[in-house]
Amino acid sequence: MFVSFQRVFTLSEKSWSGSCLQYKWQKTVGNYLAVSGPDNLVKIFDRHGQKVNELNLPGNCVSLDWDKDGDILAVIAEKSSSIYLWDANVNKTSQLDSGMKDQMSFLLWSKTGPLLAVGTSKGNLLIYNQQTSRKIPVLGKHTKKITCGCWSSQNLLALGSEDRSITISNHEGDTIRQTSVRADPADVQFSVMKTDERSSPGESTVSVALGKKTLFLFNLNDPDNPIELAFQQRYGNIISYRWYGDGYIMIGFSHGYFVVISTHIREIGQELFQAHNHKDSLTSIAISQSLNKAASCGDNCIKIHDLTDLKEMYAIVTLDEETKGLDQMCWTDDGQLLAVSSQQGSLHVFLTKLPILGDSSGTRIAYLTSLLEVTVDNQVEGESPVAIAVEVEPSFIAVGPYHVAVGMNNRAWFYALGDSGVERVKDTEYLGTVASMCLNCDYAAALFEGKVQLHVVRQLCKKKNDDRSWMLIGLC
């Protein structure tokens, strides 16, 4: 279920004031957001904006990234040869000695395995296997600073450097392809460029933005015939680009233009869509494959397009308080939350999708209206809607004549609906993960692991050892 871009929370710390932030959502589950400012700290927040930990660094954060499952956050910093690793499962930080003597400049986890690539300011490379603790140092991969890179789904590693070359290496660090480019490379990505012939399996095309002016497409299966695409000067510089769909590329330009091109060989470089999305400047674009939506931000607004019909504007969100303009955007993998940072050092998180979750009892309904909010409504009886702030982001909701229950896993919270307002009554733990729940006037029935536990929701006078307060029923 889509929602109209509710703002969930805003982070604005004194130490971030006037600075651009670096941040990444936890991969896969999106429960955590790691944020780095100019204060030698990486702060980790949960999806409701509460800080859960922070990493103290000896210098400013250079780069950070989450592993493919979202278990480990890796961070490199100025003035340090250590890689800082935060384990999300146990909320603990450890340090790994990289063994690299020059300043680390680039860091990226593999898309498919436990491999971490770290590049340095002198062009050296380290590949670290988190599972086996094996470190593979590769000296002289480039002759100058490694600035950008990307892993393919087949565990190939493409790197760009200030020596104006692109290398493609295998997971052991061996170079299998190399090509020179005519300007500084940025934003290396792997994808598949469509051809008239049957494409080989895997991501066989490396794309690179060169000198912020052109897009360079290097096909690993046809290395002698790279393609370089130039664009209209009035668009300005290339700010960022994203592959999507069947070989299409979306490109954001500094003068506010938002362009889509095809890589199909018969229409290579042809503009399929173009819009002047932002009057003065565009600073970032982001695509959510799960939502099938694209976003661009610039000036002080965010514009959302539907990928199935880019001409239709799905939503426009304006942040009047951001007078200096917006900076970067990042979506969670499931598309539920969109983080947008500003050039004055604030970070705003918007809710873009909610699961359809609710229950009914008679003419009363209860349904999820935000991550931590359930609304109870009874329009037939003319009652005013009641919004309940709940303790947990629920996976189930139950409503009865006098109560509402929300819960996740093996726990539920119960609220009484009275004339004087909502009162939290109790919370209960069960012997298994609750699949569903029903309420009547007095009792709750929780279904888990083929059994139903029946218990009183609220007792005014409960006798000690009164075994009538609950009952466990086995289901055939």
Image (tube, rainbow, N blue to C red):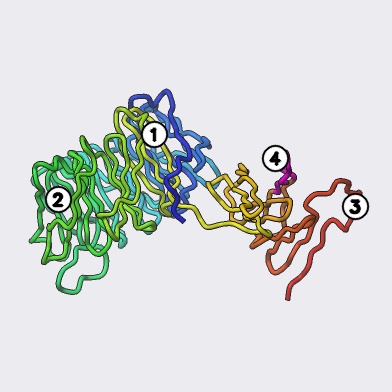
Q: In what quadrant of the picture does the C terminus appear?
A: bottom right
Q: Position of residue 462 (x, y in %)?
A: 88, 48
Q: Position of residue 399 (x, y in %)?
A: 67, 55
Q: In what element is the residue under mark 1? A: strand
Disc 2 residue type (three-letter): Leu
Q: In what element is the residue under mark 2? A: strand
Q: Which residue is the site of mark 2?
A: 215
Spatial CA span between label 3 and label 4: 32 Å
- Mark 4 and mark 2 lie on one chain; the one further toward the N terminus is 2
Disc 4 residue type (three-letter): Gly
Spatial CA span between label 2 and label 1: 29 Å
Q: Which residue is the site of mark 1?
A: 36
The magenta span reads: 414-425
At label 2, counting other C-alpha atoms closer than 10 Å, the crowd grade (few under 14, some 14-19, many 20 or more) is many
Spatial CA span between label 3 and label 2: 74 Å
Q: In what element is the residue under mark 3? A: loop
- Mark 1 and mark 3 lie on one chain; the one further toward the N terminus is 1
Residue 465 numbered mark, or none: 3
Q: Which residue is the site of mark 4?
A: 421
Contact check, label 3 and label 4, Cβ < 8 Å: no
Spatial CA span between label 4 and label 1: 41 Å
Contact check, label 3 and label 2, Cβ < 8 Å: no
Q: Residue furthest bottom?
A: 476
Of discs 3 and 4, which sits in the foreground? 4
Contact check, label 2 and label 1, Cβ < 8 Å: no
Q: Position of residue 124 (x, y in %)?
A: 24, 43
Of discs 4 and 2, which sits in the foreground? 4
- Mark 2 and mark 1 lie on one chain; the one further toward the N terminus is 1
